[in-house]
Image: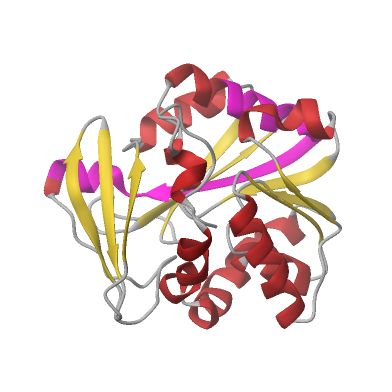
C-alpha cells in the first residue's frame, strides 16, 4: 500500500506522479514486505473465510500481489492511475493477476462498485491518513462498510502517530517500508500535518502530506461507521507498547 487514498488538499492524487510510482518500490522493499507481512494479513483473512478481497489503496501492489499469491480473488483499487499501472506491472512480474483493477476515489467506493460485494477489505501502508477532513474520513469508512458483505472484515493500518506526536519521530524501518538506502522522515510534524520527505540514493526527492491520526480516534471512526469488535495490533503483534511500534493495525468487522 502506498500512503494513498484521497485528501481534501486537492493535491493527493497528483503527489503520486509517474516518476514517484517508479521510485516507490525502492522504498517499499518488496521481498521483506512479502515475507513479513504476507503471513499476518493472509492468516487473518483465511481464518475469517474470506475469498473476495478488495485492496482499496493498492499503491504499487505489494499487498494485493501477496493476497493474490495466497489464492484470494483480489480487486485492486487506488486513486492514482500511475500507482495502479505499476501494481499491474508488478502483478505480472510475480505471475499473478487481479480479478479487477480500477482507479477510484476512496470516498465513492460503494457508488462505483456496488454494495455487499466483498468478504474483506484492506487499507494498508498508511493510506487512510491522506484524508484530512473528519467528514471525508467518515464518508470513506461508511463506503467501505457498505461494500462489505455482512460479517465482512476490514484491516486498516497507519503509522504510529501517537508516538510521533508525543515522543518524536523514530523508526526501525522493519515494517511496511523496508527498502534500503532511502532517507525517510518528517520535515513538518504537528497535530494537523505530518509532511514526510523521501530521499533516494540517486538524489531524487519527494514529499507527501498526511494527517497524523491517533489510534483511539481511528477506532472511534470505525465504530461510528458501524464496525464492531475492533482489534489492534502493533507491528503485527499484541499486546504491544504504544511507544515502541512503528505501525498500528486495526481489524474490524461489519455485523
Residue 65's place in the image compared with 136, above or below, is below
Q: Is residue 225 above or below residue 35?
A: above
Residue 129 or residue 78, whichever sits in front: 78
Measured from the top left, where is residue 50 in percent x and y? 81, 53
Tell me the quarter of the image containing the N terminus: bottom right
Image quadrant in which the C terminus is located: top right
**Location of residue 7 with respect to 204 vertically, above or below:** above
Which residue lies at the image location 62% right of the left edge and 64% below the top edge?
63
Q: Where does the magenta region start and end? A: 139-166
Q: In this view, does 162 lie to the left or right of 100?
A: left
- Do we see residue 50 in this rendering? no
Is residue 154 a member of the stretch shown in magenta?
yes
Q: Where is residue 194 in the image (x, y as percent from the top left)?
A: 26, 42
Query: Residue 61 appears at what percent x and percent y?
Result: 63, 64
* Residue 82 at x, y percent in the picture: 60, 57
The total of numbered circles placed on residues is 0
Residue positioned 21% across, 52% down in the render: 186
Amino acid at each position: 500500500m502506498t500512503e494513498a487514498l484521497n485528501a481534501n488538499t486537492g493535491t493527493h492524487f497528483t503527489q503520486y506522479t509517474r516518476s514517484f510510482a517508479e521510485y516507490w518500490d525502492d522504498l517499499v522493499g518488496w521481498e521483506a514486505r512479502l515475507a513479513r507481512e504476507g503471513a499476518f494479513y493472509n492468516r487473518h483473512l483465511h481464518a475469517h473465510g474470506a475469498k473476495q478481497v478488495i485492496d482499496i489503496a493498492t499503491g504499487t501492489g505489494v499487498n494485493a500481489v501477496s493476497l493474490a499469491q495466497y489464492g484470494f480473488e483480489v480487486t485492486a483499487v487506488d486513486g492514482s492511475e500511475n500507482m495502479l499501472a505499476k501494481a499491474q506491472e508488478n502483478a505480472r512480474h510475480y505471475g499473478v493477476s487481479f480479478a479487477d483493477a480500477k482507479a477510484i476515489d476512496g470516498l465513492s467506493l460503494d457508488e462505483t462498485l456496488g454494495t455487499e460485494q466483498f468478504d474483506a477489505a484492506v487499507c494498508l501502508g498508511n493510506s487512510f491518513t491522506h484524508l484530512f477532513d473528519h467528514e471525508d474520513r467518515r464518508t470513506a469508512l461508511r463506503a467501505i462498510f457498505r461494500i462489505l458483505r455482512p460479517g465482512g472484515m476490514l484491516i486498516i493500518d497507519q503509522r504510529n502517530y501517537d508516538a510521533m506526536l508525543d515522543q518524536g519521530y523514530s523508526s526501525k524501518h522493519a515494517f511496511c517500508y523496508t527498502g534500503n538506502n532511502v532517507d525517510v522522515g518528517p520535515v513538518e510534524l504537528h497535530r494537523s500535518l505530518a509532511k514526510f520527505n523521501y530521499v533516494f540514493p540517486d538524489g531524487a526527492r519527494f514529499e507527501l502530506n498526511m494527517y497524523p491520526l491517533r489510534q483511539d480516534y481511528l477506532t472511534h471512526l470505525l465504530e461510528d461507521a458501524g464496525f464492531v469488535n475492533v482489534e489492534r495490533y502493533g507491528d503485527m503483534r499484541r499486546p504491544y507498547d504504544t511507544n515502541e511500534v512503528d505501525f498500528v493495525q486495526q481489524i474490524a468487522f461489519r455485523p
